Amino acid sequence: MKTYSVKELLSEVNVPQDVTLKGWVRTFRANRFIALNDGSTINNIQCVVDFENTDEEVLKKITTSAAVEIQGSLVASQGKGQNVEIQVKNIVVLGESNPEEYPIQPKKHSLEFLRQNAHLRVRTNTFSAVMRVRSALSFAVHQYFQQNGFNYVNTPIITGSDAEGAGEMFRVSALDAENPPKTEDGKVDFEEDFFGKETNLTVSGQLEAETYAMALGKVYTFGPTFRAENSNTTRHLAEFWMIEPEVAFMDLDGNMDLAEDFIKHVLGYIKENCKDDLEFLEKRLLDEEKSKPQKDRSPMPLREKIDFIVENNFKRVSYTEAIDILKDSKPNKKKQFDYIIEEWGADLQSEHERFLVEKHFKCPVILFDYPAKIKAFYMRLNDDGKTVRAMDILFPGIGEIVGGAQREERYDVLVEKMKAMGIDEKELWWYLDLRKYGTAVHSGFGLGFERLVLFATGMTNIRDVIPFPRTPQNAEF
Ligand code: 4AD
Ligand code: MG
């Protein structure tokens, strides 16, 4: 007999009366009512056990998180809150779960506690909803690019280069850590290492994606990236997933259009396809907000926030305009910014970004044409000689969600910049080759997938939107 998912059963579409279902017990009340969940939806299906005709030994084993198989009839429900329920004819406990030991009780646990049980937390409503939305978002990412003529490229995880030139890399080595081979001057001899050179986990697939854009035209990556930055914040992970489109013959304006259209597509997709999960997450967020002082509460419910992004144009502002705005502003009547921007050229802090997005423009903001010296070496230099065709997209509650640029396609200018920034030309000979053979204007961006999931789910800590977060001092699972 076909096993039906709870989602199928609750939809009542093409479902016979007698069915088999399998899942995990969320709660078991009055020796009679099982709330059963199988992960297909946030909703449980109520299964009513005929306890008088069920073996007592079996009844004892129906505990929270036990895995069960049920045969029964789908009938109209007597109770409130659900249309249908299952009248259990036969129940088999497939896997017991000792209630004395099982750590996740059917009550509210702190997110911190659940992080320490990352292998079990997806059994809660909150995490199952977040992870289903995450999955739907990744589908929408591929859908968008595939529908728009992009090719998916898999860039290497182990690389010999530092794409961002920021030096925040995890080394990959097969050398004996205790006793590595040394060169004559006593340094570790990486020529003896597995790849014959120093290698690391990639911080971005961009440089390799550029090589593919210069032949396939429109490409994107979607894969894990790694940063050894010691930022213990609610927005940073040491291992995160990045989406990086790269397009030949596209300038920065095209890049902004692409990023905006892409973000609207993926958020629009979950709005249509994750209704139950978003409704649940919105309620969860409202409960959470109630415990905060009025002034710190988010003014917009989750689904309205998503609608707002989908329906409004992003504001495009140059770095220079932004600095002028910030110089003339106070975040509130009494207080200055903690970090006051005195002069043109300084990098914006997150308090400035949040001010621009949340207080000043009150919509997503695309900042562009940043000072060259605070951005990566590969960005195209403007005619003013001091700004580059960079863009960052800032989101309410998140800050930077996208970083991108038009790339420097002129060989001489690129070499000059690499020299000035201390980047070894020899290491990136293949990247420079692109500027020698059929170079062209091209652009791309990187979107941090977890920051997108954070926004879409209303969660507030990035550790809660990836199954097994990697952060400083934390790789337990
Ligand atoms: O701004 P970033 O460093 O840009 C790049 O890596 C470019 N190579 C992208 C490109 O043009 N192809 O990173 C891009 C995005 C950020 O805007 C942010 O959303 C996310 O990646 N990000 C992180 N997300 C989580 N944890 C971290 N430690 C992150 N660092 C960056
Ligand atoms: Mg950035």
Image: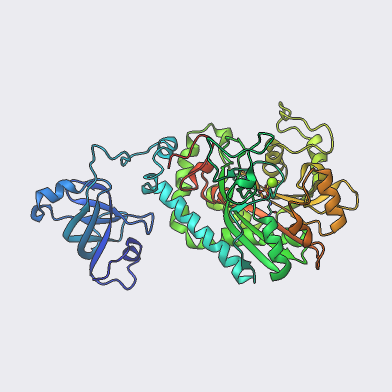
Name the spot of residue 293 as percent of width and height, x first: 53, 31
Name the spot of residue 460 as percent of width and height, x first: 53, 41
Query: Can residue 320 be seen from the camera position used here?
Result: no
- Res 321 quadrant in image: top right
Q: Quadrant of the N terminus?
A: bottom left
Name the spot of residue 358 as percent of width and height, x first: 67, 42
- Res 332 quadrant in image: top right
Query: Can residue 331 be seen from the camera position used here?
Result: yes
Name the residue: 53% across, 59% down.
138
Q: Who is closer to the viewer here, 430 or 394?
A: 430
Name the spot of residue 241 as percent of width and height, x first: 57, 52
Q: Who is closer to the viewer here, 83 or 335?
A: 335
Instruction: Tell me: 126 left or right of 387.
Output: left
Instruction: Tell me: 322 left or right of 277.
Output: right
Counting labels gives 0
Q: Furthest-top residue in view?
A: 334
Residue 134's place in the image compared with 290, above or below, is below
Q: Quadrant of the C terminus?
A: top left
